[in-house]
Image (cartoon, coloured by chain):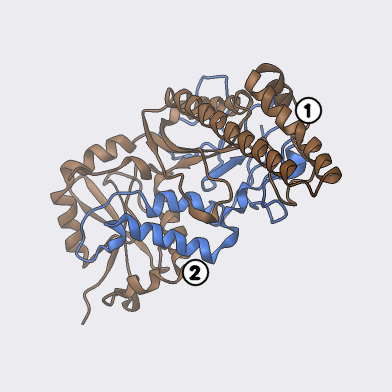
Chain colours: A blue, B brown
Amino acid sequence: MTSRPVLASPEPVSLVDLLDRVLAKGVVVSGELTLTIADVDLVHLSLRALLCSARPDLFSWTVPEPDQLPGREPHPRAGSEPHPRAWSEPPAGSPPRLPIGSAPSAPGPASEPSGSGRATPGGSGPVSEVER
Amino acid sequence: MTDPAVWLYAVRPAAAPAVPAGLSGVAGEPVRSVCHGDLEAVVGTLPPSLAAQDGVQARLADPVWLEQAVRRHHHVVDTLFRAAATVPFRLATIYRGDDRVVELLETRAAALRPALETATGRAEWGVRAYPLPAGTPAGPGAPAGTPAAPGTPADSASSAGRGAAAEAGAATGSGAAAGTAVATAPTTGTAYLLRRRTELAAREQARAEAAAEAAELEATLSQWAVAVRRLSTDHGADEPVPAVSNVSYLVEQSRAADFVACAHRLRERLPRLRLRITGPWPPYSFVELPG
């Protein structure tokens, strides 16, 4: 059982994954002061573009660790820092490390009878990532 | 005098565990709950500087502030999600006062309850797939020594098991040959054009293979999900390689382990793709309210 490092801050989540959801999804209702962000997808796009231009490293998590990817070509942007929170791929044959959200009070049992994978009890860190 | 601005993070069942003490929101403000009937809204009161007309709108143009707001909003939603069923609201949903939030809970209860049901005991998982380059990408980033050399099981399987992949493998192998060609006949325009055409064809083929694998990926993972949403694969020029698939799956917590295990197995089965699996997310992509 590999336990995931517990990360205290909300930072571990990749921004680009966040943008897809926090900016583009979520319940939209009309509030008196609800910003146009909620109404117009163009605003979402422009905000994302804004962040992308401000953060050229935004997509750097797509860069695999070369030594973790034997035989794989490096990403065109190899050379920049890989995403510091990215997971390395588990070795072949080992069960995947499961980033199941299993805070003790989480709804639904984190453990379940299936033998195809194992949950990580107590892995209550933020959204985790598995990358290869 | 400006009315108070109340930032709405999420709606939960009123019976959910109390909002954790010390949880703070986008402006560092304490997060609290506003209850009405069986529903609870989790909100924070923005400071006067943000409550002013266009206060938030102006800050949204500041990428530093925006990123922080995105992360803090998500932190609140994610914290709630790990404790109870949570319906996340989109960034910058703001009401003029708690009474307006109560009004929302009252008037939209019929839509919010089913959304909560959808969210209960489930989580969103994201799977993004990128095509692995098969040809010989131009540029110094892909020196001749690094192409997909045989040796790893996945690569062996890819070139041995499939004709198309074998052909692409040949194209990859020809990368070294092409490099040699460049070295020996760098000045021949025809040779350059031929090589260029081969490269483009290989790239095209790799893209098509990746798309086929992406379809298989989505079909297989969908079997584990109660709902599926396609997210944008268009991330503009900032993304060096556009994803061929960017899909969110709503998965029962009890099946999450199987879902992730399945995704890992697919990595081996789909050698043309590089997968990025994220989760569990609060069900951002599955909480559309009708109307």
Position of the N terminus of chain A by quadrant:
top right
Image location of residue B291, percent across then percent down:
17, 45
Image location of residue B176, percent across then percent down:
80, 37
Q: Estimate how packed mark 1 is, as few (under 14), some (14 to 19) or many (20 or more) residues with alpha carbons within 10 Å.
A: some
Instruction: Calculate the distance from the C-alpha at mark 1 to the C-alpha at mark 2.
Output: 44 Å
The chain holding disc 2 is B
**Marks 2 and 1: in contact by CB < 8 Å?**
no
The chain holding disc 1 is B
Out of A14 and A49, give the one closest to the viewer. A49
Residue under the image location 55 percent in, 57 percent down: A11
Image location of residue B50, percent across then percent down:
33, 74
Residue under the image location 52 percent in, 64 percent down: A53
Position of the C terminus of chain A by quadrant:
top right
The amino acid on which the numbered mark 1 sits, given as a three-letter code, is Pro
Out of B196 and B27, give the one closest to the viewer. B196
Circle 2 residue = B64
**Disc 1 secondary structure class:** loop
Residue under the image location 45 percent in, 48 percent down: B234
Q: Answer yes or no: is residue B253 visible.
A: yes
**Disc 2 secondary structure class:** helix
Q: Which mark is in front, 1 or 2?
A: 1
Residue under the image location 28 percent in, 77 percent down: B52
The amino acid on which the numbered mark 2 sits, given as a three-letter code, is Val
Q: Estimate how packed mark 2 is, as few (under 14), some (14 to 19) or many (20 or more) residues with alpha carbons within 10 Å.
A: some
Circle 1 residue = B150
Q: Is residue B135 left or right of residue B88?
A: right
Is disc 1 in the same subunit as disc 2? yes
Q: Residue furthest right?
A: B184
In the displayed structure, B229 sits above or below A5; it is: above
